[in-house]
Image (cartoon, rainbow, N blue to C red):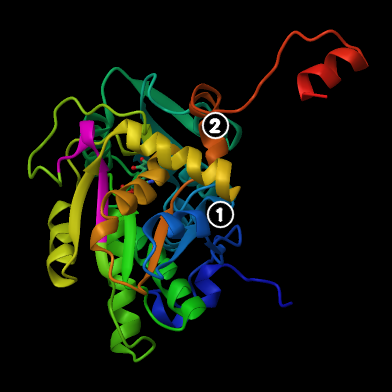
Amino acid sequence: MQDWPGLIEAYRTWLPVSDSTPVVTLREGATPLIPVPSIAERIGKGVKVYVKYDGLNPTGSFKDRGMTMAISKAKEAGCEAVICASTGNTSAAAAAYARRAGMRAFVLIPDGYVAQGKLAQALVYGAEVLAIRGNFDRALDIVREVSDQYPVTLVNSVNPYRLQGQKTAAFELIDALGDAPDWLCIPMGNAGNITAYWMGFQEYHQAGRSRTLPRMMGFQASGSAPLVNETTVTDPETIATAIRIGNPVNREKAIAARAASNGAFLDVTDAEIIQAYKLLGGEEGVFCEPASAASVAGLLKRKDEVPAGATVVCVLTGNGLKDPDCAINNNDAAFHTDLNPDLGTVAKVMGF
Ligand code: AN7
């Protein structure tokens, strides 16, 4: 098997890079597309369901796809520091790639609302972490102002190179399936990823790499659903802290993707998210973070509308290890503690 060079080299002709762009890569991309038969069975009708497990990227989320591009272009421009606001995954990816490129990384996070694994990553990757008493939307307002006034490059998804990198996930799907799926189910926070996927699907389609285009099905948590409810949420709340975002910056682009693809947006409750999260872990052996499980929760909620024989891909945006608290508090496992250390006790607990 050939060594995977990372997504910039793999898809170079589709990306705004030149020979003089210094490629900053951790060999991101080429993530597995995994069939999930227990989900497909719940839908029936001969439907095929896959998950695109982007939690297997180097920092454990799809953000690496955008960050390899954003940081490579920032380095090409001679930039020495980057900044982002983040619910966690962007900060981990920004820190890893920026430090690899020899830049300073400043990350603003909502104090107390970033999952442990993500915070651990930002610290280990050497970011300068600023936790604010405010939510993600406030943090984003601040970093936009900072990058306007000081010599620091913004690497949130308002940076167009982020979406360029992220569109390669759509290329990988078509390369693997031989055509676009019928439905693409995806969680939405700032709605950068749904925008990027749609860009990728369109570009491959126009180049004759796929016959069809998917319906873009975007899902939000009920307590944080500004796109579904066509509003701004001032106090977003959800167990899926990654998508605890009340004022998505890519709102217009996501709405355009929905319209052009005959897609739909829907919200899913925290209970529905956790149900899908447990199903993926407990029946499929696929551990994702709660925000990612929103894609599967949404598919199951809309299962009556899935056409017979359709191919559906749910995007699992982040790794389950990112949020160990959620995992420990939300499982149906048999966890026997405080046992006497002897054969009799163990055998008895095992039911022998
Ligand atoms: C696991 O890290 O916004 O709709 O600051 O971490 O493109 O925003 C994370 C978003 C879905 C939503 N799944 O993607 C951040 C951040 C996971 C995420 C989303 C995020 P967008």
Disc 1 to disc 2, C-alpha distance: 15 Å
Measuring from the top left, give residue 297's x and y in whole percent. Answer: 35, 46
Asked if the magenta segment contains residue 287, the reply would be no
Disc 2 marks which amino acid?
Gly
Name the quarter where the C terminus is drawn.
top right
How far across and down, in percent of the image, does residue 141 sit? 20, 35
Looking at the picture, how far across and down is residue 324, in whole percent? 55, 28
* Residue at horizontal 42 percent and vertical 52 percent from the top: 79
Q: Residue furthest left?
A: 231
The reply, left or right, for residue 93 in relation to residue 196 is right
Residue 65 visible in rendering: yes
Q: Position of residue 153 (x, y in %)?
A: 35, 48
Q: Quadrant of residue 182?
A: bottom left
How many marks the image carries: the answer is 2
SS label for mark 2:
helix
Q: Residue at x 32, y 32 (%)?
A: 270
Q: Amino acid at mark 1?
A: Asn
Question: Which disc number belongs to residue 57?
Answer: 1
Judged from this view, the residue extending furthest toward the bottom is 208
**Quarter of image, res 1:** bottom right
Can you name the residue that lies furthest to the right here? 343
Residue 195's tag is none
Report ligand 1 position as a quadrant: top left
Q: Which residues are magenta?
A: 217-226
Mark 2 sits on what residue?
117
Task: Identify the residue at image location x=52%, y=50%.
Answer: 55
- Camera-side residue: 294 or 318? 294
Q: Is residue 99 above or below residue 72?
A: above
